[in-house]
Amino acid sequence: MTSTSANSLQGDDFQDGISFSVLASAVKPHRLKIAALAVAIGIAAYGITLMITPTFTARATIVSPQQQQNSAANALASLGALAGLAGGGAVKSQTDQYISIMQSVTVGNRIIDRFKLMDLYQSKFRVDALKQLSSSVRISAGKKDNLISIDVDDKDPARAAQMANAFVDELRWVTNNLALTEAQQRRVFFEQQMAHTKEALKAAQLDVQKTGFTAGALKSEPKAAAEAYARTKAEIAATEVRLSTLRKTMTDSAPEVQQQVAALAGLRGQLAQFERPMEASGSQDYVSAYREFKYQEAVFEIYAKQFEIAKMDEAREGTLIQVLDPATPPERKSKPQRTVIAAVTTVLAGLILTAFFARRELRRRRAN
């Protein structure tokens, strides 16, 4: 009868679970042993952390770049669609772009070479050094203040601060060498166009010099005709660019496209009228060469003016990267957090030991 009651009790324990009072009574005889072992394990964990080389974290904070209005907005209107080709679109989020630049492989490689990180990390391949550098660097933007923070972990506090500041230096280097802003894109575009136009202008000048001056050419007053011819040809070039840009987003039946087609046809008609008397003239070579020279000269002046405006805007936008807090060598380590590790280890050890002794005590009682 007694054996049957004990078996029934054990079955009820497994089905309904163990009550807190039963669990507490099972642990109570071992409470001092559990506490002593848990504290001993926590002290051991603290001692192990003393053998770990501390890590220091340095932080540099910069102000997120802001897009500024430039002085070329009205000047570009005279070029029509050339403004779009010159990079008129603004970056949607410059903060995200600047963070991506500092996280790029190019910046990472420059940091590795600058601080000889392959030797420091004992990496055989550069890709391994890049991975370790990436795990040691955290770059983020604040949600409220939108400030960009660069956190760098390193065993040496001085090197951690130098690396954090180096990321800011590399950001400046990239922005100065790549056309990231609208002004930089315009400057690169007009610089390229000026180079092409300058070569064409030299060729046109040589053609004029080769033809010489004849009496028939002087009677036809080529200067006035050449200036009008150059203006018309420049307007045709700008209209063709505008039409090409519109056709990328609109159909040929759109009113804007039809307007540009009509304007282009009118300009070509004017150009044909200029060329007709030139063909009948006996000084065709000189007049055509002179007109081409004036055309290239007019285009070069337009590009030169826009290039100077873009350079001024670029110089003004170059001050956007401002350091709010430069990184300094940290005085306190960031890792390992010895107190936290010891406390967490003690709690976990206590829970595991409690479960172990409680289970052993309950098995002993059920066996009896």
Image (tube, grey):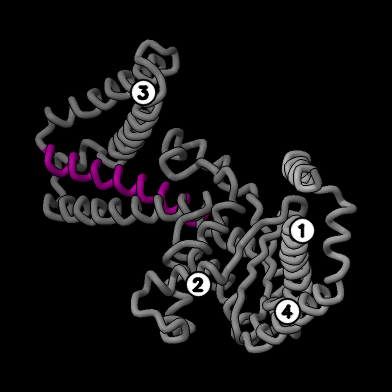
Instruction: Assign the C terminus to one quadrant of the image.
Output: bottom right
User: What residue is shown with label 1?
Assistant: 362
Q: Earlier in the sequence, mark 1 or mark 3?
A: 3
Q: CA distance from mark 4 to mark 3?
A: 75 Å
Look at 45% across and 38% down and name the residue there: 84
Q: Mark 4 is on which residue type?
A: Ile
Where are the magenta residues, as a range? Answer: 283-309
Instruction: State the image coordinates of residue 255 (x, y, percent, origin top left).
Output: 44, 12
Q: CA distance from mark 3 to mark 2?
A: 47 Å
Q: Secondary structure at mark 3?
A: helix
> Closer to the camera, 364 or 332?
364
Dot 2 alpha-carbon crowd within 10 angstroms: few under 14, some 14 to 19, many 20 or more: many
Instruction: State which mark lies toward you, 1 or 4.
Output: 1
Dot 4 alpha-carbon crowd within 10 angstroms: few under 14, some 14 to 19, many 20 or more: some
Image disc number at residue 41: 4
CB atoms at circles 4 and 2 under 8 Å apart? no
Q: Is residue 271 above or below residue 130?
A: above
Instruction: State which mark lies toward you, 1 or 2.
Output: 1
Whether 305 is among the magenta residues is yes
Q: CA distance from mark 1 to mark 3?
A: 84 Å
Q: CA distance from mark 1 to mark 2?
A: 52 Å
Instruction: State which mark lies toward you, 4 or 3.
Output: 4
Instruction: State the image coordinates of residue 163 (x, y, percent, origin top left).
Output: 57, 78
User: What residue is shown with label 3?
Assistant: 247
Instruction: Assign the N terminus to one quadrant of the image.
Output: top right
Look at 58% across and 63% down and name the residue there: 318
> Closer to the camera, 41 or 98?
41
